[in-house]
Amino acid sequence: MPDSDLLILWLNVGGAATACLANVWAGLTGWSDWRWLRYTIALIAAIYTVAYTTLALDWYPTTTWSPFMRGVSVPVWFFVWIWPAVHSAHVLRRLRLHVQREQSTRAK
C-alpha cells in the first residue's frame, strides 16, 4: 500500500476515534434530547475506527473490507447526516415556540 494511502487511513482512524470520544462526551454532558443520538453516532464512529484500523494494519483484504463497510455506511446516512439536521431543526422550533409563549405571557 502506498504511503499516502496509509497516511489517509491513519488520519481516518484518528478522525473516527475523535468523533467517537466527542460524541460520548456530548452524550454525557449535552442536552438529554440528543443523548441517544450522540451514543448512536459514537457507536458508528467506533465501528469506523476499528474498520480503518484493520485496513491500515492489513488484517483484511480490501475486497472483504469494502463490501462490509458499504453495508455499514447505509445507516450512517440516517444517523449521522440526516437525523441530526432534522432533530436540531425540531428542537429549535420547539425552543422558538417556548420563547414566544413566554414573551406573550409576560406582555399581558
Image: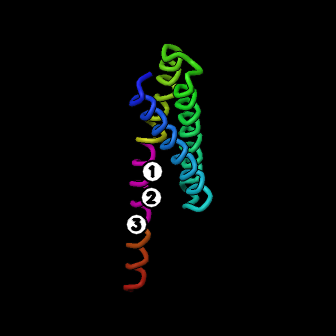
Q: Which mark is residue 21?
A: none
Q: Is there a contact, CB below 8 Å, between mark 1 and mark 2?
A: yes
In primary-sequence order, the first of circles 2 and 3 is 2
Residue 108 sits above or below residue 36 on the image: below
Q: Residue at x 40, y 60 (%)?
A: 92
Residue 36 sits above or below residue 49 on the image: below
Q: Position of residue 63 (x, y in %)?
A: 49, 13
Secondary element at image label 2: helix
In primary-sequence order, the first of circles 3 and 1 is 1
Q: Which mark is residue 97?
A: 3
Callout 3: few (<14), some (14-19), or many (20+) C-alpha neighbours within 10 Å? few
Disc 2 from disc 3: Cα separation: 10 Å
Secondary element at image label 1: helix
Query: Badge 2 is on which residue?
Result: 91
Please give the range of residues in magenta.
82-95
Disc 1 from disc 2: Cα separation: 6 Å
Mark 3: which amino acid? Leu
Q: Quadrant of residue 53?
A: top right
Disc 3 from disc 1: Cα separation: 15 Å
Q: Residue at x 47, y 29 (%)?
A: 73
Seen in the image, is 2 located left or right of residue 25? left
